[in-house]
Image (tube, grey):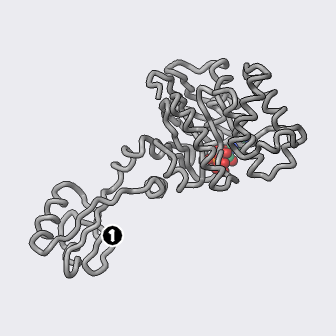
C-alpha cells in the first residue's frame, strides 16, 4: 500500500432539499488503501453525500478535501464514480462504450480497449464484448458499470451500491478488482444495504442516519465503542451472575451466560466469584459490524 497516497475527506457537508436537510453537517475521512463502507437506511443521505463528493450536486455547507486540500475538478475527473442512476448507453456495444469512456478519462483508444477487454474477461464477459448493454442480464450490466468506474486506474473510488444485483461470484471478482486498487493506496467509499458484505469487506465504516453520522472509524475502533459482551460457562448454573454489581445478564442457559460488563471492576468481580464456583470458559464476544450498525441506529 502507498502510505503517502491522498485521503478523501468530507468536512461538515450539508445539503437541503426544500425543508428537508438530507445531509446534516457530515464529516468523515476515507483513508488511502482503505475500503470504507457507507451504510444507513433508505433516505439516510448516502447518495446525496456521494453526489456532493463528486460535484454533481452543489453543497449548502462544508467542503470536500482531497489530500488535505479543497477538491478540484481535475481531481474529480481522475476518480472512479459509480452513480446510483448508473448511466451507460443501453443500445451501444459494451467494449465500444467503455473504450470511449476511457478516452474521456485521458486513456489512449488502444489502452482503453485492451483494459476494458481484460476487465470484462475477468468478469466472465469475454464472449460478450460486442454485445449491446441492454442484451445483458441486470447482474452483467452491473459488472459493465463497475468496469466503467475502474477502467482508468482511478485515484479514488466512490461507488453507490456497487454490489446490488451481483451474485456471490461476481461480488468476489469485483472485490478482487477493488483490492488491486486498494493495494495501490486508492481510498474506496462504497454504500451498501448488505450488512453481511460490509462486514466481510470493510476496513472502516461510516454509519449515517437521518443525514447525520452516527458512528465512523475503523472496525476495531467501532467494536471497542459498544458495550463489551462476554460468554461465560460456570457449572452448574450461571444464574448467580444476575446478582453481581455492574453486570447485565443478556442471556442465561444452564451453565452458559452472555454478559455485558460495565467496567474492568465488574469483570474482576465476575472472575473472582466464578473461579470459586468452577469457571470453565470466559471469552470476549467480538461484535460484527452488523451488530454495531444495529446498535448505533437503534
Ligand atoms: N433531488 C432531490 N430532491 C428532493 N429530495 C431529495 C433529492 N435527492 C434526495 N432527496 C431526499 O434526501 C434524503 C436523502 O436521500 P438519499 O438518496 O441521499 O438517501 P440514501 O441514503 O442514498 O437512500 P437509499 O439507500 O434509499 O438510496 C431523502 O429524504 C430524499 O428523499
Q: State the image quarter where residue 189 is shown.
A: top right
Q: Position of residue 297 (x, y in %)?
A: 49, 54
Residue at (61, 33) in percent of width and height:
157
Q: Position of residue 294 (x, y in %)?
A: 47, 58
Q: State the image quarter where residue 211 is shown.
A: top right
Q: Determine if residue 287 is in view.
A: yes
Give above or below for 171 relative to 277.
Answer: above
Label 1 CB sits under 8 Å from any ligand 1 atom: no
Callout 1 environment at 10 Å: few (<14), some (14 to 19), or many (20+)?
A: few
Q: Position of residue 202 (x, y in %)?
A: 49, 45
The quarter of the rendering in which ligand 1 is drawn is top right
Residue at (67, 19) in percent of width and height:
73
Give above or below for 191 relative to 249.
Answer: above
Residue at (39, 56) in percent of width and height:
287
Q: Position of residue 151 (x, y in %)?
A: 69, 31
State the residue lying farthest toward the left: 276
Please state if 53 lies on the left or on the right of 204 as rendered: right
Check disc 1 and report the residue beneath it: 250
Instruction: Identify the element where label 1 is drawn.
Output: strand
Residue at (51, 32) in percent of width and height:
183
Q: Which residue is at the front of the view, 76 or 14?
A: 76
Please state if 208 lies on the left or on the right of 60 as rendered: left
Q: Which residue is at the front of the view, 73 or 219?
A: 219
State the residue lying farthest toward the right: 91
Please state if 108 lies on the left or on the right of 250 as rendered: right
Q: Determine if residue 20 is in view.
A: no
The number of callouts visible is 1
Give above or below for 128 relative to 165.
Answer: above
Amino acid at each position: 500500500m502507498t502510505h503517502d497516497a491522498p485521503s478523501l475527506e468530507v468536512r461538515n457537508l450539508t445539503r437541503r432539499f426544500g425543508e428537508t436537510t438530507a445531509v446534516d453537517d457530515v464529516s468523515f475521512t476515507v483513508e488511502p488503501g482503505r475500503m470504507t463502507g457507507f451504510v444507513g437506511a433508505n433516505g439516510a443521505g448516502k447518495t446525496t453525500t456521494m453526489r456532493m463528493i463528486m460535484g454533481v450536486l452543489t453543497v449548502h455547507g462544508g467542503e470536500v478535501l482531497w489530500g488535505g486540500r479543497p477538491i478540484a475538478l481535475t481531481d474529480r475527473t481522475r476518480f472512479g464514480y459509480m452513480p446510483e442512476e448508473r448511466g451507460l448507453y443501453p443500445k451501444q456495444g459494451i467494449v465500444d462504450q467503455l473504450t470511449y469512456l476511457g478516452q474521456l478519462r485521458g486513456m489512449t483508444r488502444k489502452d482503453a480497449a485492451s483494459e476494458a477487454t481484460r476487465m470484462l474477461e475477468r468478469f466472465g464477459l469475454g464472449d460478450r464484448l460486442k454485445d449491446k448493454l441492454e442484451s445483458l442480464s441486470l447482474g452483467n450490466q452491473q459488472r459493465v458499470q463497475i468496469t466503467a468506474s475502474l477502467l482508468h486506474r482511478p485515484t479514488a473510488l466512490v461507488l453507490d451500491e456497487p454490489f446490488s444485483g451481483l451474485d456471490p461470484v461476481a461480488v468476489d471478482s469485483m472485490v478482487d478488482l477493488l483490492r488491486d486498487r486498494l493495494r495501490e493506496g486508492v481510498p474506496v467509499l462504497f454504500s451498501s444495504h448488505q450488512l453481511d458484505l460490509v462486514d466481510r469487506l470493510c476496513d472502516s465504516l461510516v454509519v449515517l442516519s437521518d443525514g447525520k453520522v452516527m458512528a465512523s472509524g475503523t472496525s476495531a475502533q467501532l467494536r471497542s465503542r459498544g458495550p463489551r459482551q462476554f460468554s461465560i460457562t460456570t457449572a452448574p448454573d450461571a444464574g448467580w451472575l444476575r446478582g453481581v454489581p455492574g453486570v447485565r445478564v443478556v442471556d442465561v442457559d444452564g451453565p452458559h451466560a452472555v454478559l455485558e460488563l460495565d467496567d474492568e471492576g465488574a469483570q474482576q468481580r465476575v472472575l473472582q466469584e466464578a473461579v470459586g464456583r468452577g469457571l470453565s470458559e470466559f471469552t470476549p464476544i467480538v461484535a460484527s459490524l452488523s451488530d454495531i450498525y444495529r446498535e448505533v441506529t437503534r
